[in-house]
Amino acid sequence: MALETETSVEEREVGTLLAISKSPAGVLVAGGDSKAVLLTEVQPENGKRMSAGDWARGLRLVPGDRFSPVQLP
């Protein structure tokens, strides 16, 4: 589940992890048009749905890490 936020993320590349927050709980990722997306839940491939914060901490992600673009079929 993702919610668009009003957070300005100018000068950040799309897919850059901006923060792992406890309130609101989630992972904030830079999106397009100087906006950010708050991931509240994720479901890893072949895995169970979990909170995005637990997922990020388990992978030891830190602000500044960047997600690779996904190639859609």
Image (tube, helix red, strand yellow):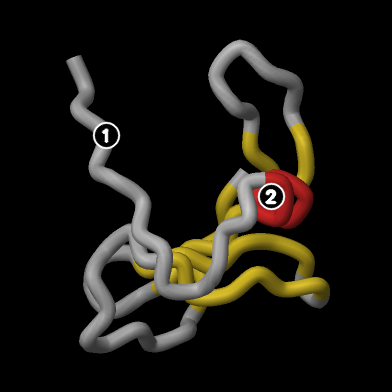
Q: Of residues 51 and 65, which is closer to you in this image?
A: 65
Q: Quadrant of residue 16?
A: bottom left
Q: Left or right: 60 with respect to 70?
A: right
- Name the residue at 75% across, 21% down: 48
User: What is the residue that sits farthest to the front in this orientation?
Assistant: 60
Give the amino acid at mark 1. Answer: Val
Give the amino acid at mark 2. Answer: Ala
For numbered disc 2, what is the local secondary structure? helix
Residue 70 numbered mark, or none: 1
Residue occupied by mark 2: 52
Q: Name the quadrant of the N terminus.
A: top right
Q: How many marks?
A: 2
- Tell me residue 31's x, y (percent): 33, 64
Q: Left or right: 7 with respect to 59?
A: left
Residue 49 sits above or below residue 46 on the image = below
Q: Earlier in the sequence, mark 1 or mark 2?
A: 2
